[in-house]
Amino acid sequence: MMVSEVPSIPIRTEISDSFLEYSMSVIVSRALPDIRDGLKPVHRRILYAMHDAGLRANTGFTKCARVVGDVMGSYHPHGDSAIYDALVRLGQDFATRYLLIQPQGNFGSPDDPPAAMRYTECRMQQLAERMLEGIDEKTVDYKDTYDGKSLEPVVLPARFPNLLVNGSTGIAVGMATNIPPHNLEEVVDAITHTLENPDATAEELTQFIKGPDFPTGAYILQNQGLRSALTTGRGSIRMRAKADVVEVKKGRTAIVVTELPYQSSPDRIMLKIAELVRDKKIEGIRALTDQSSGKVGTRIVVDLKKDANPNVVLNQLFKMTPLQDTFGVNFVALVDGVPRTLNIADAIGYYIDHQMEVIERRTKFRLEKKQDRIHIVDGLLIALDNIEEVIRIIRQSKDVADARASLMETFKLSEVQTNHILDMPLRRLTAQDVTTLRTEQAQLKKEIKELEAILKSPAKQRKIISDDLQEIREKFGNGRRTRIIPDEGDFSLEDLIADEDLVVTVTNAGYIKAVPAGVYRVQGRGGRGVKAAKLKQDDVVTRVLHTSAHAFLLFFTNRGKVYRIKAHEIPKQDRTARGTLAQAVMPLAPDERIEAVIDTRDYESWKYLVIATAKGQVKKTKFSDYDSRSSTLIAIKIGGDDEVVAVRMTNGDNDLLLFTKDGMGIRFAESDIRAMGRDTQGVRGIKLREGDRVVSVARDGEGEEVLILTQQGFGKRTR
């Protein structure tokens, strides 16, 4: 007995070879789609099994469990759950742009799994039938199934561009693919253009294919990532939910989300919003409800508080939740069994090559059929034209074989022709049948000539592809679901806020509000005006400022601090509303109050800012020093019981006037004070008597007059 020798292989080599073999198996046989039909093996086998079982769009529904069983038993030796998941995805309108499976039953939702396969049913969509159109005409190659008992197609004819239209996602070993869906009408237009202009570039085709078209709609922000995805096959696409601000009750608004970014989960979005509200990272949300249903589709309602700015809240939701998300395009597909990264021009080029091959093979198949038929018709007509002689030969023959040989020799017929003559019943000898055969012969000659012309002319083949695609476009095409809007970069809070004129008011009790300037109508000189605020008893308005929503507001307090916020961040309220406590807008201390408000956009409208305190300290600072990222700054160092009483803007050559409670005053040139940093005390501007304090500061220009008013109503005008 011979003992076979066991070869010795280094374990490093064996592991490397085995892993490489496994990797290639996953890449080629599972995870990546074929560029020609855009399908992975499992999807191809599902469609072929349904085609083989006759589950057409015009037939009844069949249990998904039966389809899964057929696929697993005949073609796909993997788990039933993987096959069912792949089948379900082809029938989910939130996952697949153009459905290939028509579902019946619970096929799941973005948050919920489908029902078990024993409860659901399916059949092919009409568009799926176009994927297999011509498969019985030798248009594609076949290979043995895993058990060698039957055959399966290597690729489907794919009469429409499934990969570009429906996209694909898969993770292989060492590589992945993430191809977004696109609009059928746009893709067909791009293919038609390429058929007419074979050298069309990806840049050129972007005039037809604007970008992905997701089944869930929403928006795509047009940026460099989108263009890169189309022209290189790699890029990051920014998606944004469709959200509208609506009035739900008088004085109350809500944000209603009706379309979500592709592959987003409503439950996950709801949970994220709830977390942000709980952690006080987003203010102004009163309630959150998910009103989505099969009837109304996606509908997430974010109820806002009465004083909330809906545009600011919406902007925060986009920045902090999956209501704005990205789709990383990685257009990887198998080309001749090898993974390649492709742009849209490459993908269209390979699809056209596949269709040219399908048309050529189909035409050859049909030509062979026509030639076989006309060969038989020619023989039948020869026999009918010589029917008397044919009958004589048959009657004189000793058996069928003798008759066949005599007919073939006498009329120069082939064996196929002779067999059909011998099988011809007597009823075919009528004049009507002869006429029918001659008509068929003429028609066959015409069709054969046309088919031969198609085989000889690539231009005719391209015309057939174009015509077929136009027919598919007209029947199955629809408008874009995903709108493409300009991307202005990362959000700032003004991006979704109109730069409207506002009137900001501050009261002595610390209430603050912003009102659109348009609510104050223009009145004549004798008009009484309108009520501007419903204040508490003994409260008065101390500051009124006309500004715009995008302007910076600098709130100077008696404690020497300055708080910088945007005007639109102040709660917008009705004209007669009391307002919101300033502590809700800025972190004021209990003993801190607003003494001055200044608005600016660029910190260049004035050169300096002068601050005066009750004890006569004066400080001049460059206005640009307040242009800081920090929202809270020190404007002046305050000592003891001193406090800020006035803030004035200057241009560097003004005169300054300080007035005290006891009626004293001083005037000096602004240039007498040197500019200092923010975190300083300043210099003495006026020497005060005991018990006296500075109450006001004025800025005087050349030739201007000063009007002084007292608490008792006296006034004096001084030059």
Image (cartoon, rainbow, N blue to C red):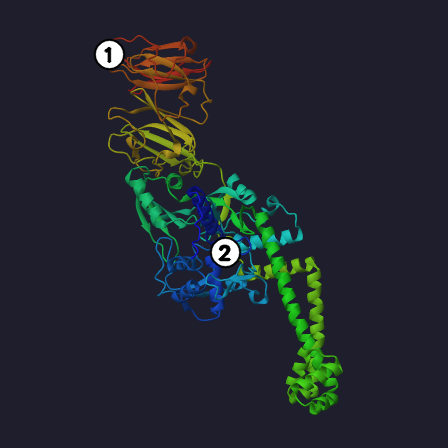
Q: Which residue is more in the foreground, 349 or 392? A: 392
Determine which of the numbered discs, if any, sits on residue 174 in the image.
none
Is 563 situated left or right of 465 in this image? left
Residue 169 placed where, x, y %? 46, 50
Tag 1: Cα neighbours inside 10 Å, few (<14), some, or many (≥20)?
few
Q: Which residue is more in the foreground, 38 or 320? A: 38
- Label 2 SS: loop
Residue 223 at least partly seen: no
Residue under label 2, please give it: 39
Query: Hey, what amino acid is under mark 2?
Result: Leu
Is 680 situated left or right of 200 in this image? left
Is 196 situated left or right of 284 in this image? right
Q: Quadrant of the C terminus?
A: top left
Count the marks: 2
> Reading the chain from its start, which is encountered first: label 2 or label 1?
2
Q: Which residue is more in the foreground, 395 or 461? A: 395
Residue 204 at least partly seen: yes
- At horizontal 64% and vertical 61% (from top left) the residue drawn is 360
- Label 1 SS: loop
Tag 2: Cα neighbours inside 10 Å, few (<14), some, or many (≥20)?
many
User: Which numbered mark, 2 or 1, is in the foreground of this view?
Assistant: 2
Determine which of the numbered discs, if any, sits on residue 691 in the image.
1
Residue 664 placed where, x, y %? 32, 11
> Between marks 2 and 1, how big is the CA–CA gap?
90 Å
Residue 36 placed where, x, y %? 56, 55
Instruction: State whether residue 89 is above or below residue 575.
Output: below
Q: Quadrant of the N terminus?
A: bottom left
